[in-house]
Amino acid sequence: MNSAFEEETVVNLKLMTIFARLGKSISNKVVPDIKKYGLTPNQFGVLEALYNKGPLTVNEIIVKTLSSSGNIDLVIKNLEKMNLVMKRVSAEDKRCRKVELTEKGWELISTVFPEHVLCVDNMFSRMGLSEKKELSKLMKNLSKSIGEL
């Protein structure tokens, strides 16, 4: 590394490399487990949000899954074609439609999500609880400094 850089800059660049590799490693672990059920990561994200939060509006799904409005409409449409979700008029607000799991969608995500949890648990198995909490706090601070929270 060019010695003209400050030590902090060198550490920052190393962290960026670590994060990039980590993102790829996580994707390599998680995506195959999702794809074996015929789902894309975005479809899994929608099903997971509905599984854990119940019926949601499209805007709520966008927030929960960090998706874009253009992309999420297509994802939901494809999940509807697969008979995994359906849209219903909200009981609270007749102007609003909520997306909810169908019975088939509930059965699928009830199988996929516990396997996903095991995969995530395995990824963090070498860390103690206090380390995980500290890492979570540090990552939130980083996210705030980047402006994503």
Image (tube, grey):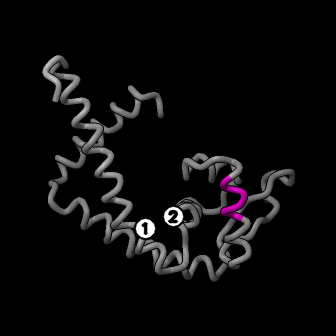
Residue 68 appears at what percent x and percent y?
Answer: 64, 47
For the residue pair 95 and 86, the one nearer the viewer reads as: 86
Relative to residue 3, is residue 42 depicted above or below? below
Q: Residue at x 16, y 30 (%)?
A: 1
Q: Give the amino acid at mark 2.
A: Pro
Mark seen at residue 41: 2
Q: Residue at x 46, y 76 (%)?
A: 112
Looking at the rendering, the stretch of residues picked out in magenta corresponds to 71-76
* Tag 2–tag 1 contact (CB < 8 Å): yes
Q: CA distance from mark 2 to mark 1?
A: 6 Å
The residue indicated by pointer 1 is 31
Q: Earlier in the sequence, mark 2 or mark 1?
A: 1
Relative to residue 85, is residue 91 depicted above or below? above
Residue 102 lies in what quarter of the image?
A: bottom right
Q: Give the amino acid at mark 1.
A: Val
Please tell me whether residue 17 belongs to the stretch shown in magenta: no
In the visual, does 47 lie left or right of 7? Answer: right
Question: Secondary structure beneath disc 1?
Answer: helix
Residue 89 lies in what quarter of the image?
A: bottom right
In the visual, does 131 lie left or right of 141? Answer: left
Of all residues, the one furthest to the front in this rendering is 2
